[in-house]
Amino acid sequence: MAKEKMTPSIDPAACYVLDIADMMGISTAFSRAADHKPCTIGNGQSGICCKNCYMGPCRITKDGQVGICGATLETIAARNLARAIAAGAAAHSDHGRDLAFTLDAVAKGEAQGYEVRDVAKLLAVAAKHGIPTKDRDLNEITQDIATKAISEFGQQRGELSYVATAPEQRQKIWRELKVAPRGIDREVVEILHRTHVGDDQDASHIMMAAVRTALSDGWGGSMWATDISDILFGTPSPVVGQVNLGVLKDDEVNIIVHGHEPTLSEMIVTAVQDPELIEYAHNKGANGINLSGICCTANEIMMRQGIPSAGNFLHQELALLTGAVEAMVVDVQCIMQALPSVAEHFHTEIITTSPKVKIKGATHIEFDEHHAMDIAKQIVRRAIDNYPNRGKTDIPQIRENMVPGFSHEYIAYMQGGMYRASFRPLNDAIAAGRIRGVAAVVGCNNPGTTQDKVHMDIIAEFLKNDVLVVSTGCGAIAAGKYGYLLGEAGKEKVGAGLREVCEAIGIPPVLHMGSCVDNSRILTVLTQMATEGGLGDDVSDIPAVGLAPEWMSEKALSIATYCVASGAYIIMGVRSPVAFSEELNRLMSEDWEAQMGGKLEFVPDAAEVVRHSLEHIDKKRAALKLAPYEPKRHGASGDVPLEAYFELPLEQQMAELYG
Ligand code: BF8
């Protein structure tokens, strides 16, 4: 049967550039996905495949069949999923490790161009890990934090120290289930061991080990990555930025940084402001140097420096198709191997920089934190040298303003200022029903589904239903493209109660909280909401859900699993990697909910996702004995002209004021 033609994207900038690709006969992830016939065994739709040893591979296409070693459907499904979670946890955590090495080099005075930019954060992180700060030199504290972080990767026994920062009830659950992570590398290695032929054969036992590995990411590697990035580059607070392909400039040298780690990209941010390099660009006929980002590197430098984002994951090839990019500088994760073959139609140079990532056809300039600024300048100079080679350009003039930068510290600050920072107003607004609940809509783009559509359909419904949305990763970039990251996100778009809160505090209805490793910030927010009081004692009590509607990476599976283990209801879209194993799906929903209060489900349809989410939020509200959510109950305050307000009966005036 012919494959039904899917609309590739709801983003007009993407569609504009895809027409260019069509005209030039250049393939992109969109066209390759349309032509591709997915292996239904490999994606779990019509069976499952085990290739963990060389007696097979064994294809299991119905329940009751077993592999050559006797492995059952659910064991094979659990092994495959556990390996994917371990790979995702490894990627996030290795990112955290590299930041720890950079911090270590800073403490030793060996990291050219880096410094501790956020002393308050340094002291807060030290306090979290029991590192003394009183009367100590900042360098000594920095060294102790770096040493502590590095040691947690190789730690063999005990618990990661962030475990003790989770709500007490949560810690108890983890200890009872024996899933409190011991050491970051140890948990990843153990999954590889357990899933080797002839080892762990019990699906639920394998998945509990996967839970511990995912927790070593969320409450370990990723949390370290976020905290150390804040120490080195500053804790984000709201800044004005811009997003979409229209941020590229026709008359300037365009450099795009793409990938994940902020270490090199932050140096490039500094290098492009160097007067000598700007002068050099002028000498080559350009009006300046224009830096932008793609994927989570974009989020890192957008959140802190307001550097524009050229788009999310599926924009990486599209940016090159404008013909206006002199250099795309990549580090790790989410980088398509197709980039050099798209770039070869233009003058663009793809530059790999990580010792871990090389791509045939790309130039490799290896990053080293000890000489970071020299390397950053070398890359910028190279891009400028490439400017005269530019041919015809075609940049869609489509861009949107956005306000990212909602770190958990800023969210607390915005609710009470420097002296009364707290989560009390948010908890109160949820308790009063002004805000029905909170949803984290995060994750990737996936060309298996129309780009940004499910993200946007879900966000639109949540906002109408007074659900406050937080976002990270490529989902946050998507929200930015359609204007949801602005305070003026539209009266008709946002329910009256939620709008009242957003207008009173002065925030957008969707809060951009950062990159994918910054999902650890969401864990911290949930912890602070749980400990603030009024919404139960644990993350699992809060009327909240987490969604990754267009996910594609193994990291997303790790994030989902650590969020479930932290007590959240998580729904992932696109398709289930374990669809064929009813037993494993039941285990991750029913069993995990009974054991950990959180559950994981795969639901591709946006309307279904919203229905499940709102039902869950209302169920949690009822369990907390909060008033049932009523859409029209709140929100008239800003809409009643003052004279009209005073004409209201006193009772109603009070209701307008206090809910
Ligand atoms: O780091 S960049 S595609 S994997 S969401 Fe997804 Fe986007 Fe990749 Fe997470 Ni971030």
Image: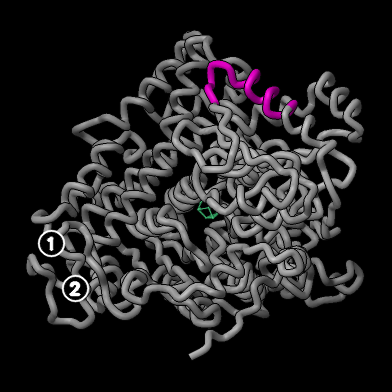
Please, what secondary structure does the residue beneath circle 1 have? Answer: loop
> Is label 2's Cβ within 8 Å of ligand 1?
no
Q: Which mark is residue 55?
A: 1
Which residue is at 91% across, 70% downward? 643
Crowd band around label 1 with a 10 angstrom C-alpha radius: few (<14), some (14–19), many (20+): few
Quadrant for residue 338, please give it.
bottom right
| Nearest the eye: 28 or 461 | 28
Identity, as a three-letter code, of the amino acid under mark 1: Met
Identify the residue under disc 2: 73
Report the side of 623 relative to 176 (left or right): right
Q: Which kind of residue does numbered mark 2 sit on?
A: Leu
The x, y position of residue 276, in whole percent, is 83, 19
Compared to 440, does 22 lie above or below?
A: below
How many C-alpha atoms fall within 10 Å of the one at disc 2: few (<14), some, or many (≥20)? Answer: many
Please check the rendered image and state whether residue 372 is part of the magenta-colored stretch, yes or no.
Answer: yes
Which residue is at a point 24% across and 38% down the rendered structure image?
A: 186
Q: Give the residues in magenta.
A: 367-381
